[in-house]
Amino acid sequence: MNCKTLLTLLPLTLALACKDANDAVTDSGGDSNTGSDTDTGEPAQTDGDGDGFFAEVDDCDDSNAAVNPGAAEVCDGLDNDCDEQLDEGVMLVFYADDDGDTFGDPASTTIRCEVPEGFVADNTDCDDAQAAVNPGAQEVCDSLDNDCDSLIDDDDDSLFPNEGVLSYADTDGDGYGDPLQRLDLRGARGLTEDNSDCDDADIGINPAADEVCDSVDNDCDSLIDLDDDSLTDGLTAYGDGDLDGFGDAGDVRVVCSLSAGVVADDDDCDDSDDGVNPDAEEVCQDSADNNCDGAVDEDCPVCDDLSVVAYYDSFTAGARPWTRRRRSSASRSTPAALNPPSPRPSTAAAGTCW
């Protein structure tokens, strides 16, 4: 090749060499901002994690694209937003749960990104030493505020129904409860487990009371006074069929009070005849025990069989005539009566023989 040809190719060779050198610099530096800026004289800036922030300016971790001034702070132990604070504003408060009931003690806290062992996010436990006490527990009769609502036992409307046993109002304090006033409480004053009181306003009325004569069902057995075999103060009385004030011992009754036809006396020996009773006078020669003393015609004169007895009714003096009765062994039971007597005596006493 002659010299003329070499001189012609030399400029083209130099141009190509310069282009290759520039390409090499671009490939190794990334862009026109890398390396020395021959135009401005400023140092080169790098963005190693490609997040658009430069390590030389404000990217505090150019190896982590999630860390830069434009990132949101998250709870991960890193300064995500490059403000020189770790996890600011995003850490959580947790509360100790010593009794393991999943409800935390508001007085015992820790601040963490994640819940540590023995802590919970809740802070509503009112007694962190008892697992049975927390807002999710059921109020029961144990003198504790089981459900942490500041109300205990009977004062809490949420007391567990049928907790232990039911209770009933005992307004009269006799130990027997009103079945119509059922309460889901136990052990409170004015309450009882019994529900058999038929009148909770009267302490003298309950199943243990005595039935007495007062027109009330005292012992709560649905039977009143004389209808109740357990009546304790009933009177023993006797029927007085003839209303003479004397009763028939064979007609025994239990009553709450005496009345016409019912008397306390039982000495009438003939309750069909009001003229026969212990107060009546004995009438001679009538073959009856008029005064109920067990003897017939006692203290009357004894006449022989052929005598005639002058008889006078002392109870109805003047109303009945004199009568003559012939007494003989054959006619003593049904003596023949003669009226008027002949001759009629001017004076004679009842039962006088003449």
Image (tube, helix red, strand yellow):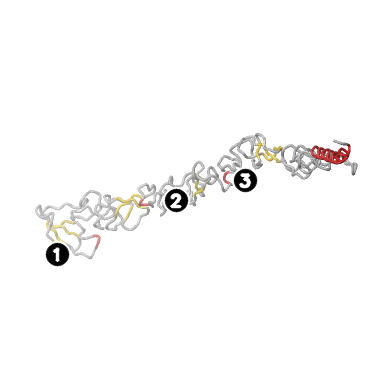
For label 1, the crowd category at 10 Å Cα-Cα, with few meaning under 14, some 14 to 19 and many 20 or more, is few
Q: Which amino acid does label 1 sit on?
A: Asn
* 343 left or right, relative to 230: left
Q: Tell me, yes or no, if residue 317 can be seen here.
A: yes
For the residue pair 274 and 351, the one nearer the viewer reads as 274
Q: Which numbered disc, 2 or 3, marks the residue closer to the eye?
A: 3
The residue tagged with tag 1: helix, strand or loop? loop
* 158 left or right, relative to 307: right
Q: What residue type is labelled 3?
A: Asp
For the residue pair 274 and 320, the one nearer the viewer reads as 274
Tell me if residue 285 comes above or below residue 56 in the rendering: below
Residue tagged 2: 198
**Where does the image place residue 326, in percent across and percent down from the top left?**
12, 57
Mark on residue 29? none
Residue tagged 3: 149
Mark nearer the N terminus (1 vs 2): 2
Residue tagged 1: 339
Q: Tell me, yes or no, if residue 56 can be seen here.
A: no
**Where does the image place residue 152, in percent across and percent down from the top left?**
60, 44
Quarter-wise, where is residue 239 in the image? bottom left
The residue tagged with tag 2: helix, strand or loop? loop
Q: Which residue is drawn at 33% across and 58% down?
A: 260
Quarter-wise, where is residue 115 in the image? top right
For the residue pair 302 and 16, the one nearer the viewer reads as 16
Q: What residue type is labelled 2?
A: Cys
Mark nearer the N terminus (2 vs 3): 3
* 220 left or right, relative to 306: right
For label 3, the crowd category at 10 Å Cα-Cα, with few meaning under 14, some 14 to 19 and many 20 or more, is few
